[in-house]
Image (spheres, rainbow, N blue to C red):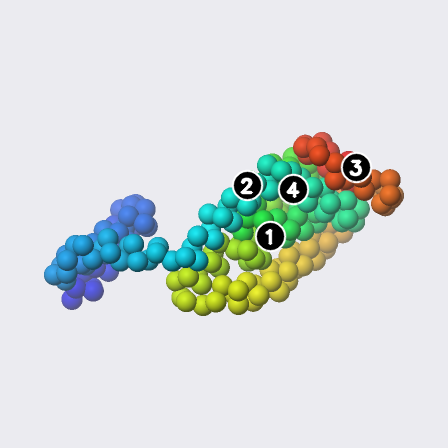
Amino acid sequence: MLAVSMFALMIFLLLAGLPVAIVLGVVSTTWVIMAGSSIQMIASRMYAGIDLFVLMAIPFFILAGEIMNHCGITDRLIKFVNFVIGRVRGGLAQANIYASMLFAGITGAAVADVAALGSIFIPAMEKQGYTRKFSATITAVSSIIGPIIPPSIIVVIYGSVTGVSIGTLFAACVIPGVMVGLGMSAYVALVSKKKNFPKSDEPFEVKAHMLRLFRKKKISPNQMSPLK
């Protein structure tokens, strides 16, 4: 009967529009009180849930991503991917996907991927004739690779909660993450051919442009041709 009451309370609070986190906290606290347990058990269980050494990896992943962004590594990754793949049909869309795959190894979070790449790729794609809807969709969809390819914050949390080896989970996520990226790339290739999306006709001259590719300079949407 208690379980039914708690379930009904949870549904009522969710329908009332309360955030899920608050609903879970209210239901859990009510369960403890009605079950006759000590209220101190809530604080004890909360502390025990976060008292895991492996969870320290999460803030350090975020810190590493911020350091790399401020050092210009993100800009260099975007330049490199756009230099390599930007000459095919729909090159900027393809570069968007592969940049997300590389960026996944920096932050491991989809939101960080969108924030870092979207401000560069979306305006650049619009300027080359892509629709805003298509540009935003490619950026948002490719960002889901971030939590798949290691290091992934979600994988760390899952492993810490379930007791599964983090290293094993990381190894298991590499191939699915790459396959997701390649599947998106294949779809973009088909759509680009059908809608005749633009491509660059610039020659692929590695010696002439490799030094310029990695020079220390902030990227703007106007610099997203493969050789700039």
Looking at the rendered structure, the secondary structure element under dot 2 is helix
Residue matched to label 4: 73
Looking at the rendered structure, the secondary structure element under dot 1 is loop
Q: How many marks?
A: 4
Mark 3 is surrounded, within 10 Å at the Cα level, by few (under 14), some (14 to 19) or many (20 or more) other residues, namely: few
Q: CA distance from mark 4 to mark 3?
A: 15 Å
| Residue 101: percent from left, percent from top | 63, 53
Residue matched to label 1: 105
Label whose residue precedes the other's in the sequence (1 or 3): 1
- What type is the residue that disc 3 sits on? Arg
Q: Residue at x 32, y 49 (%)?
A: 21
| Residue 3: percent from left, percent from top | 20, 64
Q: Is residue 223 visible?
A: yes
Mark 2 is surrounded, within 10 Å at the Cα level, by few (under 14), some (14 to 19) or many (20 or more) other residues, namely: some
Q: Residue at x 68, y 34 (%)?
A: 219
Residue matched to label 2: 66
| Residue 220: percent from left, percent from top | 68, 32
| Residue 36: percent from left, percent from top | 12, 61
Instruction: Report the front residue among 196 and 211.
Output: 211
Question: Which image quarter is the C terminus in?
Answer: top right
